[in-house]
């Protein structure tokens, strides 16, 4: 089944120096852009992370320190990446938990105020886990009947994710071919900041999801304990989480 799109959607995958959203950096990014008329556009960039990768990480994706040493940094590539995705929704495999938060961190480090508020995000892994409980390679075999060659290559993983979503729509009649619906369905919880440190409760109120103020409304916490805002800003939280928290604080002050 082809995707029913009201706007373009960009499937993307990242390879990085590690798994920490706040500390690690992108070394490869691949984007497959699907337009509402069915046209496709794809780009893959190697990225100099400006830090050394361990042998354990290199063994996973096969990208060596030498291979990226002379490639452009993300800051040098940022506007080219933004030009490709700025009018689009986003989709990926485990993207809500990892790829999107890491991408947003890189944009913010490059002084680009990237905002997820005007787009939806479809996480194909979460759809898969709700339906079948498997890995990406198994998902590709299960839904598409193919063996995923070059797994952990950003380009191969991106193409496979796109094919899986189309096959999921063919297989499950209850899945609506609508990106807003799929974004809602593929979110395990309603995160405000994607990393999940700030989430919506059942009443749609922003709440902290961690620590001593777990499940308590952010606005109320900041009113009772103004110093908590400064603690979060100075601690090892994603830049986008800090940006969201600042927005909530400013909204409260202006109300």
Image (cartoon, rainbow, N blue to C red):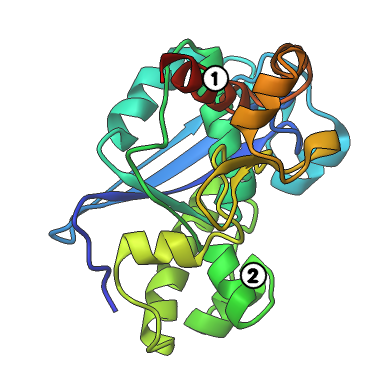
Judging depth in this view, the residue of 80 and 209 nearest the camera is 209
* Position of 12 relative to 198 (above/below): below
Crowd around label 2: few <14 · some 14–19 · many ≥20 (10 Å): some
Q: Position of residue 61 (x, y in %)?
A: 70, 45
Cα distance between the residues tagged 2 and 1: 43 Å
Residue that numbered label 2 is attached to: 137
Between 205 and 15, the residue placed more toward the observer is 205
Q: Position of residue 23 (x, y in %)?
A: 75, 23
Figure quadrant of the C terminus: top left
For this orientation, the residue located farthest to the left is 37
Q: Secondary structure at mark 1?
A: helix
- How many labels sit on residues? 2
Residue displayed at 69% across by 32% down = 21
Q: Is residue 33 above or below residue 161?
A: above
Residue 90 visible to the viewer: yes
Percent of width and height locating residue 64? 72, 31
The kind of secondary structure element at disc 2 is helix
- Give me the residue at 48% from left, 14% from top: 253
141 vs 253, nearest the viewer: 253
Q: Residue at x 52, y 54 (%)?
A: 203
Judging by the rendered image, the residue that carries numbered circle 1 is 249
Whether residue 66 is visible to the viewer of this picture, yes or no, is no
Query: Where is residue 75 shown, x and y percent of the image?
Result: 49, 13
Q: Is residue 7 left or right of residue 57?
A: left
Q: Is residue 33 rendered to the left or right of residue 65?
A: left
In the rendered image of this protein, does residue 47 appear above or below residue 15?
above
Mark 1 nearby-residue class (10 Å; few <14, some 14–19, many ≥20): some
User: Which residue is rendered at x = 37% and y = 85% of the image?
Assistant: 170
């Amino acid at each position: 089944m082809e995707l029913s799109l009201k706007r373009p959607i960009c499937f993307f995958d990242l390879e990085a120096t590690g798994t920490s959203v706040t500390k690690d950096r992108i070394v490869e990014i691949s984007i497959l852009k699907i337009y509402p008329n069915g046209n496709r556009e794809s780009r893959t960039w190697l990225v100099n992370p400006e830090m050394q990768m361990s042998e354990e990480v290199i063994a996973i994706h096969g990208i060596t320190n030498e291979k990226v040493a002379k490639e452009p940094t993300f800051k040098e590539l940022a506007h080219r990446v933004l030009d490709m995705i700025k009018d689009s929704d986003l989709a990926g495999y485990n993207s809500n938990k990892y790829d999107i938060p890491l991408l947003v961190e890189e944009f913010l480090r490059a002084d680009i105020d990237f905002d997820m508020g005007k787009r939806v995000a479809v996480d194909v892994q979460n759809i898969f886990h709700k339906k079948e409980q498997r890995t990406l390679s198994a998902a590709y075999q299960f839904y598409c009947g193919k063996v995923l060659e070059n797994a952990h290559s950003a380009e191969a993983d991106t193409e496979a994710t796109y094919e899986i979503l189309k096959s999921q729509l063919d297989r499950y009649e209850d899945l609506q071919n609508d990106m807003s619906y799929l974004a809602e369905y593929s979110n395990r919880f309603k995160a405000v900041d994607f990393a999940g440190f700030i989430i919506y409760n059942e009443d749609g109120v922003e709440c902290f999801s961690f620590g001593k103020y777990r499940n308590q409304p952010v606005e109320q916490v900041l009113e009772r304990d103004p110093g908590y805002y400064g603690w979060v800003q100075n601690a090892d939280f994603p830049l986008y989480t800090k940006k969201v928290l600042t927005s909530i604080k400013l909204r409260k002050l202006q109300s």
